[in-house]
Structures are given as structure tokens and as C-alpha cells.
Amino acid sequence: MDHMRVSHTDRERACAILREHLAAGRLDQTELTTRVASAQNSVTFGDLYALLTDLPALPGMALQSETSPADVRQPAVKPAARPFLPTGPGPGQGYRVAAKVLLVLGFFTLGIGWVVAVAFASAAHRAVAPNGAVPRASWSGWAKALIAAGILVPAAVVAVAIMAALGYFDSGPVPGPTHKVQFMIVGEDPKAEVGRFSLNADEYSVSGEGIPLPFTQAVDAGSLESIRIHAEGLDGFDGDSDGDGMEDEEYLGGTILTCTISVNGQIVAQAKARDDGVNACEVSYSN
């Protein structure tokens, strides 16, 4: 400031101050004359201040006026507002942590956790700093993955549920263990024939007549419920052949039948026809 050049007004103000000091007795006439001459020849404010350094300041008489160039100050430049730079956890940090936790939990909740994680990731993206500044955050890779998972996984779950409801995944009842069931009908006369017969095992059922003996039939059965053989011989007592209402006593020489049921190689049931003129055997097995 001392190097600032002075104007005529500044020089006259310095002379007025010197005269006041003369009136106050601080200067004599000779000193006043010398200092006034120096003041009128001053070039800078430093020259004027040098004439007043040993004199006290006078109230209301400043060397520099409020409008003097030396008093003019450049307006202070206000520094530009700096973006918010948090020193601790940034805005939305809690949302980001929650989103990451839910990302892991989504694998154990059929993707439901991923849907909630997307909401937290979005909240973290829009989080506002304490000073009101909105950070220019960009979606990170995991946040984009959350969005994709939050859309695709629930859609896949819904699609699977619909397909299951429509029966796309039905493979029918699980087959149980099968059993080897063998039917056998034999007669005492190896050349005889069996008359009417019927065989039943699980879903297997067959009937017929006039089959040469011995007769065997093996089937696979998933269930051992209601396995049955019924067989009748061709020969035997001929019943009421003469129509007199009385059973005939004549035996026609038929063979006695024996019916046997075996399961997985083990005989489980066996019956022999009685020699009573009917000559029929019937045996059943259930487990």
C-alpha cells in the first residue's frame, strides 16, 4: 500500500493533518513549513506516512479517505463450492451393504432377496449427502447384476411354478420293486389237461381252458395283493349226466389237480383238489 501513488487531495489532507498538530503544539512553525513542503512534493503514500510517523493519529482525520484508491479493495473471491467429499461412510453406504447381504440371501430364498436388494441398490444410487449434494454415482457392476437378477429370477420362479402346475414335471408314480410270481398247475396224470382256469396277480389277469398239464406261467408283479389261481379238471365225476336229479357215482378217471403259487422262487401257497367229483383247486396269496 505504501507504494501507491497519491493525488492532490491526498497531499492536501496530509497538510491539514500537519496543521492540526501545529495547533496542538506538537510542531512548531519551522517544522510545519518543512513538512508541508515535503507533503506537497510527495509521490506515494509511503512518502506521506514518513511525515506522520512520529505524530499520533487524529480522530476523524485519516490520511486515506474511504474513497481513496488505497482503500479500494478487490472484492473477495468466494471459492467455488466443492463437491461433498465425505470423510466417513458415504451417502447410501448402509443401503449398499444391505443390498450386498441380500444378494447372498437371494440364493437361499428363491430370488426373493434379490428383489429387495434391487430396491436397496436403487436407494443407494439416489442417496443425498448431508450437505444436500447428490453424488454423481454410476451403477456398479454388482448393482447391474442385482437388477438383472431381480427381474430374471422371479420371472423364472413364476415360469417354473406355472409349468409345475400344468404337470410338466410329473413323471408318474415312482415304480416300486417288482416280484417274480410263478403260477403252476399240475395233475397226477401228466397227460391230462386242465379245464377252465384263471390267474390273477397285480394288474395281470388271464383265463382259458383246455391247456395241457403241467402248466406254468411267470409274471412280474409290483404288488403281492390278491394273487390267485383257480383251476378245474376236464375229467372227474360227470355230475348228473342222466338227468335224474341225482349225482352220478361213476368216476370218469380224471386227474387230481394241484395249484401252486411261488414268489421270487419260494412257494408261498399251494392247494390240491379234493376227490369229490368237482376236481377243482383254488389257492390265493396276499402280502
Image (spheres, rainbow, N blue to C red):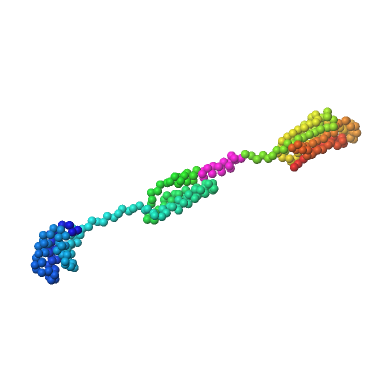
Q: Is residue 98 visible?
A: yes
Residue at the (8%, 67%) spot, across then down = 30
Residue at the (83%, 37%) spot, across then down: 272
Q: Quadrant of the N terminus?
A: bottom left
Q: Name the foreground residue: 28 vs 194.
A: 28
* Residue 117 percent coordinates (x, y): 48, 49
| Residue 157 forms part of the magenta stretch | yes
Q: Furthest-top residue in view? A: 191
Report whether 261 appears left or right of 105. Answer: right
Residue lying farthest bottom? 25
Which residues, given as a range, are shown in magenta? 153-170
Q: Between residues 99 and 284, which one lies in front from this camera angle?
A: 99
163 in relation to 52, above or below: above
Which of the pair 47/135 is nearer the observer?
A: 47
For residue 42, side relative to residue 171 (left or right): left
The quadrant where residue 268 appears:
top right
Q: Position of residue 164 (x, y in %)?
A: 58, 42
Viewport quadrant of the C terminus? top right
Residue 6 vertical placement versus 26 (above, below): above
Indicate yes or no whether the magenta region holds residue 13: no
Q: Is residue 157 left or right of residue 188?
A: left
Please indicate, yes or no, whether residue 10 appears anywhere in the rendered image: no
Question: What main secondary structure does the magenta stretch of the protein show?
Answer: helix
Image coordinates for residue 121, horizontal then vertical, percent: 45, 49
- Residue at 37%, 55% in the rendered image: 131
Q: How many marks?
A: 0
